[in-house]
Every structure is written in C-alpha cells, then in structure tokens.
Image: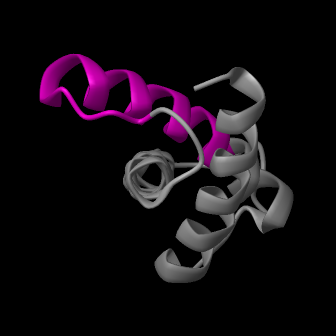
Amino acid sequence: MGIISWLIVGAIAGWLAGQVMGGRGFGILGNIVVGIVGSIIGGFLASTFLGLDVGGFNIVSLLVAFIGAVIGLGILRLIPGKQPFER
C-alpha cells in the first residue's frame, strides 16, 4: 500500500483507537499521529510475520492499523510524566 493510503488509514485508526481507549487522551491530533505511526509499524509487522495482505484501503488494513494504534497509545500511556501530545 502506498504511503498516502497508510496515512489515511492511520489517521482513521488513530481516531478510532482514541475513542476506544478513552481515559486521558492526547487530543485528536495526537491520536492521529500515533495512529499513523502505529499503522505503519503494524502493517510492516503483519505483512512480514503473518503474511497478511495489507495493501489497499480495506478492512484488513484498517484492522491492522487500528491494532497498531491501540498498542501505540497503550505504550505511550505507560510512560510516566507529561506526554508530548497530552492535552
């Protein structure tokens, strides 16, 4: 999948992950940034280790990006202190 598609999917996944994770948040922009990073990492890992076809704008790509974004948000919330995108 092209980088533009991953940015769009990541933005959607980041927003969804922020909604699902609730609690203290990083704001919509912070969640989107974490979602984009999580989607890129999640897409790479899913295609490399699981052999999933994460090409294109489809439900599998969105699910992989969403899981990556949730994991990314969870890891950031484990770090003590003020976060860069925390509101």
Image location (x, y in percent) of residue 22: 55, 82
The correct choice, above or below, for 22 with respect to 83 in the image is below
Range drawn in magenta: 34-54
Image location (x, y in percent) of residue 54: 41, 36
Q: Is residue 41 magenta?
A: yes
Q: Which quarter of the figure is the C terminus placed in?
A: bottom right
- Closer-to-camera residue (86/17): 17
**Is 59 left or right of 84, judged from the image as shown?**
left
Seen as rendered, the residue at the extreme left is 50
Residue 42 in view of the camera: yes
Residue at the image point whose x is 50% and y is 47% from the top? 76
- Closer-to-camera residue (25/31): 31
Residue at the image point whose x is 75% and y is 58% from the top? 86
**Is 86 left or right of 34, judged from the image as shown?**
right
Seen as rendered, the residue at the extreme top is 48
Q: Does the magenta stretch include residue 82?
A: no
Residue 82 in view of the camera: no
The correct choice, above or below, for 24 with respect to 3 in the image is below
Name which quarter of the figure residue 23 lies in. Answer: bottom right
Residue at the image point whose x is 27% and y is 32% from the top? 46
Image location (x, y in percent) of residue 17: 54, 67
**Is 52 left or right of 78, judged from the image as shown?**
left
The correct choice, above or below, for 9 with respect to 19 in the image is above
Image location (x, y in percent) of residue 28: 81, 66
Dominant secondary structure (helix, strand or loop) of the stretch shown in magenta: helix
The correct choice, above or below, for 23 with respect to 74 in the image is below
